[in-house]
Amino acid sequence: MAAVNGDPEVMRWIRDGSVRDEHQTRDGIQAWESEWESQGFGLFAVEIRSTGELAGFTGLSVPHFLPEVLPAVEVGWRLGRSHWGQGLATEAAVAAVRFGFEERGLERIVSIAQVGNDASERIMTKLGMHPVRETVNPTSGRRVRVFELSSDQHGTTTR
């Protein structure tokens, strides 16, 4: 994961665009694991079945960095560049959304992308999400677009 987080092209659309080193990546993974314990959801490793290679992650998290959308759960993803354009992010995000609605009983899921990140917005659209607002990420000063999907739109009901 440190190799993925250390690639400037991968990190271009993440917060302020800064890369993360191995220590920062390790801290991030520990935070993700804590979220599983406290929230009952979190991020999943995305692996290539045929090789077991780590491609990146997808999953659910609380977007604390954007307080104006809270309470909310966000679906997100990050893959290494060699895995782009193969449909992996969409496939993984579909599974994460299904998990959120069907296994965790969420009523809505958001996804947040920086304006200009057309690849992520295409994935959001494939998930059935629709844009609900454009705003500024207060942690980076960059413009972001918030997409949303409700359990009703997804075809599931909450528990």
Image (cartoon, helix red, strand yellow):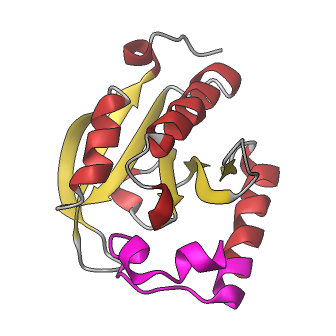
Q: Residue furthest right?
A: 37
In magenta, the rendered stretch is 1-26
21 vs 103, nearest the viewer? 21
Quadrant placement of the N terminus = bottom right
Residue depicted at x 48% and y 51%? 76
Residue 59, given in percent of the width and then of the height, sits at 59, 46
Residue depicted at x 47% and y 45%? 89
Q: Is residue 27 above or below residue 153?
A: below
102 vs 52, nearest the viewer? 52
Q: Residue furthest front?
A: 50
Snapshot quadrant of residue 140: bottom left
56 vs 30, nearest the viewer? 56
Quadrant placement of the C terminus = top right
Q: Is residue 11 magenta?
A: yes
Residue 99, given in percent of the width and then of the height, sits at 64, 29
Q: As drawn, is 49 to the left or to the right of 98?
A: right
Q: As drawn, is 141 to the left or to the right of 29?
A: left
Q: Is residue 19 magenta?
A: yes
Residue 60 appears in the rendering: yes
Residue depicted at x 63% and y 19%? 102
Q: Is residue 107 above or below residue 145?
A: above
Residue 141, given in percent of the width and then of the height, sits at 25, 79
Residue 23, given in percent of the width and then of the height, sits at 71, 89
Residue depicted at x 31% and y 75%? 138
Q: Is residue 66 above or below residue 70?
A: below
